[in-house]
Every structure is written in C-alpha cells, then in structure tokens.
Amino acid sequence: MTTDELVIAQLAGANPVADPASPSAQQRAEAERILRRVLHDAPAPRRSRRRLGLLAPVASLLVVVVVAAVVLRTGRTSTPGASPSGGLNITLSALPTPQTPRVTTAAMSREITLLQRRLASIGHGFTVTRSGANGIVVTGPKGAAGGGTARIVDLITQPAQLRFYDWEADVLLPNGRTVASQLPSQDPSALSVSQGGAEGAGFPGPGSMPLYAAVTLAARQPGQQDRRVVSRAGPQYFMFGTPGS
Amino acid sequence: MGPQVDQREAFEELFAAHYWAVRAYVLRRAPSGSAEDVLAETFLVAWRRLDSLGEDPLPWLFGVARRVMANHQRAERRRGALTARLQGLLAGQASHWEPPTAMSEELALAMVRLSSHEREALLLVAWEGLEPARAARAAGCSPAAFRARLHRARRHVAASLADTPIAPRSTIAGEAP
C-alpha cells in the first residue's frame, strides 16, 4: 500500500457516519419530513425554456424589454395621408375590446401616451390629440413619415408585444463566465446577479461591474457567429451607452 | 399527467436516490442539530433547479450542501461574533472543522493543518468515495485542479504523519513520478 493509499485508508477508517444500508424508522420519518417540507414550502419550479429551445420568461432571470399593454384596439376610420399643409395626418378610432368593453377617458389617455412614446422613437414633431369620444388624430410635419405613411400606421396600430430576454445566458461575471453557467455551482457573484440585492433582480449590485470594466471584459471574449445574421460575412459590432448619450 | 406532477415525481426519485448519501455527507461535516435544515435547503435548491440537473446530480448536490453549510456557519459566526470578541476568542480560530472522535490524534492534527480546500478534497475521496472527476464537480473546480489539490493534501498529511518536514510545493511539482 502506497503512502497516498494509506492516508485515504486511515481517513476512511475514521469515517464518522456510515451510509445507512437499512435506515431506521426514525431516519425514514426524518427523510419524509424533509421531503414534505421542500415540496410544501416551495412552489413547483418553472420549466426551463432553454430545453425547449425558447427564451425563458422566468421572473428571476429576465428583464422585460418591452412592456406595453394595449387595452384598446385602434382602428383606422379614415384613409391616412397628407394634410392640406403637406404634413402627416392620420385619424384613428378606438374600439372596445373584451378586456376594455367601454372606451373610457382613462383608456384613451393611456392609448394616447402609448402612441406618443411609439412616435417619439422614430422622430420629432408628431402630435397626438384626442378627437371626440373615441377618436385620436396623429399629425406630423412634412416629411415626418420618413419613407412612408404606411410605416407610421403600422407602428401605431400594431398590437404591443411582451418580450422576454434571458440575460443570464449572456451576462458575464468578473471571471469571464456567464451567470447561467455559474448558477449550478452557486457562485456568489452569479447568485447576486441572478437574485439581485434588496432592490430585486436586474438592478446593479455586488455582482455587477462598471460599464468600462464590462466593456473590457466583453472585449476579451471569443467571437461568436450569430446564425440569425446571415447577410454579413465579417464580424458585427455593437455600440451602446447610457440612454440619450 | 400534468407537468407539475411529472416534476414532483422526478424530484421524489431524485430525493430517494440521493438523500441518504447527501445526509451522510452533511452529518460528517455539520453539527447534527443543523443537519435537517441544511438538508432541506439543499434539496430545495435541487427542486428549484430540477430542470437543469444533469445525469449525475450527486456531486452537484454535495456542492450545494457544502455551500449551504458554509452559509449556516457564517450566520452562526455573525451571531457569535460579539460574544467571541468579548471573550477574546475570535483570534486564533484557524479552522472551524472538528475532527470526528474516531480519528486518531495524529491524523486529526494533520487534517486540521490542511486548508479547507485540501481537506475537502481528501474527504470527498475517502468518505464520499467519489472518483476525482466527480469529486471535482462537488468541489466546484476543474478535474486538474482537484487532482493537484488532492495530491498536495495527501503529501501534507503523509508528511505530518511521518513527522517529517513538508516539502515545498515547487519540489513536489518537480518530483519524478
């Protein structure tokens, strides 16, 4: 027996707890109590959508990218086109839906705010005003359509979509590995990013890092071909910054 | 049969297959009074992560249990910190590991002198009977790192038992096989 084997043999001989070949009734009762405690105290885990090939809307994992609950179905009642002054002029009417059976003032206000946000994302100078009980008029300066009135109409009449982004699969920890890959080993930084601090998940905390450090860390990662982008032969770069910068 | 029923059955199978091994792992390292809480928390993590468990979840369960025990020990230390400071006992607490009574004094002394990583490497092999590759998963490191850790631990213990000076690491690494 080698010295190494001797060390292991001595340790094995000092093992304080043997594997119970036949647990006692008390030990089985303890096991049953723990099993009940786990199953009764915790809700059923949500199925991982990664296994299904989909993005997972698990609350602790996700950042809501777009949240816009449209309570009204907006229908066109007039042909969109140019106003007499040459600008954009679209008249819409709000129709009741099963979720909002009555077109109330509050619902109209929400809808106008939503349209203003959407239009602000493509340019300046748009005006959204209420017209009558259920009418909404969108006007814009000449050339505001920027390539087509149809594009504007599509933008403001499309139902909102709720999308989820599984950011744990992409967020890097200071060690250069993703949060998702470090969660099974209960890495403290990964847990911090995943579960968040007192503010909740997704907020900067102990697991996060300054923007500059994040950029330098990301720059050291190997390139990865995005199979969804097939029109580009070379690398693809992304530019980002704080909102409004 | 709904998905939640499937998940519950899968978890109960996991529990039945590994509970006793995890229980033994915990009892070998934690005070028996806290073992039930540690086991419940460990399997609660497994229940939450049921979909992401691999085909061999036992090493992973050991790793979770080790971290749960560490959290418990940290909480205990926080609770006892004030008392310890008042009693002047905080300094000199080099190791929180208590050797089992069945262990010889020489072996216990050698084990206490090891770092916590080295000690855990030895115990995963000697007490849990894991192969180095599986033990590495339980320890949360690469197989190569685990083998190096295990090698160092064996050498340190062997040297301590032989009451000989421990060779520097560079000498150990440069030794012929």
Image (spheres, rainbow, N blue to C red):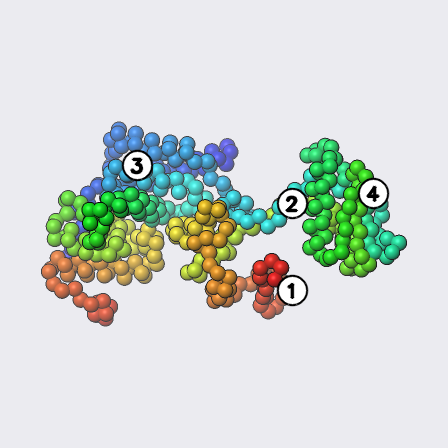
Q: Seen in the image, is A13 located left or right of residue B1?
A: left
Q: Earlier in the sequence, mark 4 or mark 2?
A: 2
Q: Residue at x 39, y 52 (%)?
A: A188
The residue wearing badge 3 is B36
Mark 1 to mark 3 CA distance (whole Å):
57 Å
Quadrant of the drawing holding the C terminus of chain B: bottom left
Q: Position of residue A189 (x, y in %)?
A: 41, 54
Which SS class for mark 2? loop
Looking at the rendering, which quadrant does residue A148 occupy?
bottom right
Crowd rating for badge 1 (residues with CA inside 10 Å; few <14, some 14–19, many 20+): few
Q: Position of residue B126 (x, y in %)?
A: 22, 50
Which SS class for mark 4? loop
Mark 4 is on which residue type? Thr
User: Nearer the observer, disc 3 or disc 4?
Assistant: 4
User: Nearer the observer, disc 1 or disc 4?
Assistant: 4
The residue wearing badge 2 is A68
The residue wearing badge 1 is A231
Mark 3 to mark 4 CA distance (whole Å):
68 Å
Q: Earlier in the sequence, mark 2 or mark 1?
A: 2
Q: Residue at x 30, y 32 (%)?
A: A30
Crowd rating for badge 2 (residues with CA inside 10 Å; few <14, some 14–19, many 20+): few
Crowd rating for badge 3 (residues with CA inside 10 Å; few <14, some 14–19, many 20+): some
